[in-house]
Amino acid sequence: MLKIHAVSKTFFPQTVNEVRALRGIDLTIEEGSFTCIIGTNGSGKSTLLNAVAGTFFPDSGTIRVGEADITRWTEYQRARLIGRVFQNPFAGTAAEMTIAENIVLAMKRGLSHPLTAALNKSTKSEIGDRVRMLKMGLEDRLDNPIGTLSGGQRQALTLLMATWLRPRLLLLDEHTAALDPKSAAKIAELTKLIIHQEKLTALMVTHSMQQAVDLPDRIIMMHKGQIVEDFQKEQKKRVRIPDLLDTFDRVQKRELMDESVAEMLIRDYV
Amino acid sequence: MKIEAVKTENALLIKISGRLDASWSDYFTDTFLEYIRNGEHYLVIDAGELTFLSSAGIRSLVRISKELNRVKGLLRLIQANDFVTGTLRMTGFGEWLADVAPEDLLVVSDDTNDKSEDTDVFVLKKDARIVVEVVSAWKPWQQVKEKEVAMHEFQADSFALGIGSPYDKLAGKESKYGDFVTFCGHVVYQMPEDRSRPDYLIPVADFVPTLQTIQCLHGRGEMSHLWRFAPEAEKERQGISELASRALAMTNAEQAAFVILAETEGLVGAYMIQSPGAEQAFKPNDFVEMRQWLSFCGEPAYTGEQSLVFGIVSRRDSPDNSGLLVPLASNPGLAMHAHAVIFPYQPLQNGVLDLKNQIAKFFNGPPPKGVMHLLDDDRPTLGLGESLFTRGAMWCAPVQWKEETV
Amino acid sequence: MNLIIGAFTIGLILSLLSLGMLISFRMIKFTDITVDGSITLGASLTAVLIMSGWSPWLASLAAFLAGMVAGSLTGILYTRFKIQEILAGILMMTALYSINLRIMGRSNIPLLDTDTVSEWPEQLLFNFAAGENRIPVFGWPVSLIDLSVLITSIIFVAVIGYLLYRFLLTHFGTALRATGNNVQMVRAQGINNNKMIIFGLALSNGLVALSGALLAQYQGFADVQMGIGMMVWGLASIIIGEALVGKSGIGVTITGAILGTILFRLLIAIALRWGLNPNDLKLVTAIFVFAALVAPLVFKSFHKKFQKKSNHA
Ligand SMILES: Nc1ncnc2c1ncn2[C@@H]1O[C@H](COP(=O)(O)OP(=O)(O)O)[C@@H](O)[C@H]1O
Ligand SMILES: [Mg+2]
């Protein structure tokens, strides 16, 4: 479904601040699979998601969704295929606009925006019905500015908006990280529910080992702009939190192998 | 709650005062487990000022008692008040109650005197020997040739280390040669994959663990000596080179085989994460490529866990028949090869330990955490040094090389 | 009474300017300085076209379109060439100064004895008043011409205000408003935010130019200097409108901008009447806008200090 091939991205190339955020990423995501990306801060997880979403173009490599090569599509062109939820609960909704207006935009995600009235009675009742599913009582507040809601409520709505029109691919970037534990758990639950109900293909960055173990079918670990581990299928099923922590350890340990160690090992490891 | 311990002749007398309930039970348990860790296996609680005992407190006591049972230790409460006595009787733990005055504990009693100064070296069997067979035709990181592979069956008296595979075909990467170590026929083998836990083969009924090895030191026989060591004021930990040199001294031999079972201060070593195979001829000429082959610990590892080590040590000036012994940086007079398997911590009984029983106990307990080829990292400034142990046991015996090998 | 009607009329005409600026400053949140140039553009183009015999309606439409072109150019400078918004506006405004001079061929054009868009209601009133030149309103005699301009302006503003209201509630209008609110979200919803900014500026400046077109017809001349300070006036009007009716809902905001502009013109008329030097008008307006921008901050910090004090007590 999603095929990322040899994608690299360097920020501030050829300066002292040069960051090689992605170093030749190869990744294929199957239709209908749910993948988590974990990794240390700055390992390039968000950058990878941004590359897929089209926030910037990669320096090299290709990105395909299905048959389409979307490498040079702009972000808003890709929106037809991709739904997104960001880490910042305020990033996914327009604060000064009402709940209904925000959702109405999502109902036209990637489509044209005609000069017809955006909200009428039937649209509103349709919105109300689906918002009721969140069980947050928001269906009675459709005409309130979304900025008056809590982070958790806004993130729930963002999730609903990202999946209102079924996306080919759902991108979630640490979307529970900025929430209090209770809201975070609720959003995680909701995420799982929606992804399963709609049989979505999803790529989710998470900081929570627990979520990585509980939610997806596959776990990918990134480190310094590379994919260093990939637990899928049977492998994934047996993975527990300590295994993930071990893997982090190992990946970092691998870094410690430098020339002096190699020299010592060549001499002493017989 | 207050906990004060006084060491008496043959037990640790611990005076506790206050309430032993849910809010103190963790602290209480940890303190007592630490006593056990430190080798105090006879614990007498002076409960004279213990005012209250809740069921969380009883759970702590049960946990401590269980831990003591494993090392054949003992837990007793003395001077308990009526409430505590009643609670314990009612819950069926009346056996913990004893009727001794604390003063009486200061009297030396005769039945348990394992622990006096000079008795930490034990001669088990005077002329026991370990007869060692060697497989060493393969050298890292050559291509593996058919004739370099040797099958080894590990019997109940087998101690071994090397690189081998439980699969019976020589193939490419799939032949899965990895580091292994064997104790009394129990084999632990590290699958040559970065992320996998060690696998182990235990002799049950007629099953004889067998590996096809490309590098192996396989010794058979019995251990002649045992040394029990524990932290002392002037020496809190033992380096593996010191233990090895001690093994040579105790056995009075040029070459000795040894088994260490000890609490770990830190292990330094590496293990293979990619298997050499029939079609691979590889020379790790840079460290980036080396990362694909070996996992190096990076820092002293497995602190606080129990290591089980098998090694063979030789004086430098006597000939190395195997070609597998590496000079030790920490003691240039010695050359050694040792592999370790790491188990979760379990306390050891004091006094003479039976090697076979201990091996059986650890292999039937929680699974091993890793296998390592131990190294002496002497890199200037960055070097991690050698593996260190705090307390435990070392069995050893002189080595006799099997005639026909190499 | 003439004074009031005059202020009312100018207020209504300029409320188109305010509505335009409402789109740029409040909806897409773009500090657009093109305004000063595009209002003159509208005025000068209309003047020239009417002089050369165009119908005032067509001339006003042309002004609207010209304003849209100017606005889009500012938008393109900003989105395509990544020039900061203020600088893009200044560039456009400066360029328009020369363009306006070119259009007019000199620095001002008088519009004497020409038709205006209020021709038709004037005829109507004339018939109604049975040939009189003045009719009484609340007892005051008011010139028919003035009255017809006022009526025309009211109709104009009402229609445009309503259309704008409806427009902002369409899918497209919703997308436009979201652009100023949260660009990241808008892009994630598949909306080309650059296109929205360009379109928003076009619409905004189109309305501003239309306002200029009507102003020229009302005043009877177009002058290359007439746009100076218009942006600040518009801003002042919007701020007054918000203070007057708040900003909950689009209808309210639009109404507020219109009322704000009218009130502002009345205030100015009164101030001038009381002897304010017309040359100081722009300074006073600037100070007013400054105060309006700063007041909320000052209030907030006062509030905090007060709270702190009461906490201490
Ligand atoms: N837009 C950007 N401009 C410059 N540097 C960036 C940008 N986005 C990310 N980076 C850098 O790229 C690296 C990877 O960042 P990111 O993908 O956000 O990491 P993660 O999400 O795994 O924490 C970091 O060093 C970060 O500073
Ligand atoms: Mg080895």
Image (cartoon, grey):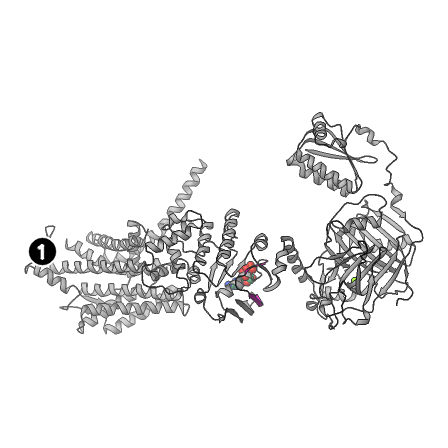
Is residue B270 one of those drawn in magenta? Answer: no
Residue C224 seen in render: no
* Residue shown at the point (42%, 51%) measured from the top left: A131
Q: Which residues are magenta?
A: A18-42
Looking at the image, the residue that sits furthest to the top is: B82
Label 1, on which residue?
Answer: C135
Q: Quadrant of the C terminus of chain A?
A: bottom right
Q: Is residue C300 above or below residue A199?
A: above
Q: Disc 1, ligand 1: is the CB inside 8 Å?
A: no
Q: Which residue type does callout 1 highlight?
A: Ile
Is residue A33 one of those drawn in magenta? Answer: yes
Looking at the image, the residue that sits furthest to the front is: B206
Q: Secondary structure at mark 1?
A: strand
Q: Position of residue C199 (x, y in %)?
A: 34, 66
* Residue shown at the point (39%, 44%) measured from the top left: C302
Please state the total of marks drawn on the protein image: 1
For this rendering, which residue is in front, C168 or B3?
Answer: C168
Q: Is residue C197 above or below residue B2?
A: below
Q: Position of residue A130 (x, y in %)?
A: 41, 53
| Chain ID of residue with mark 1 | C
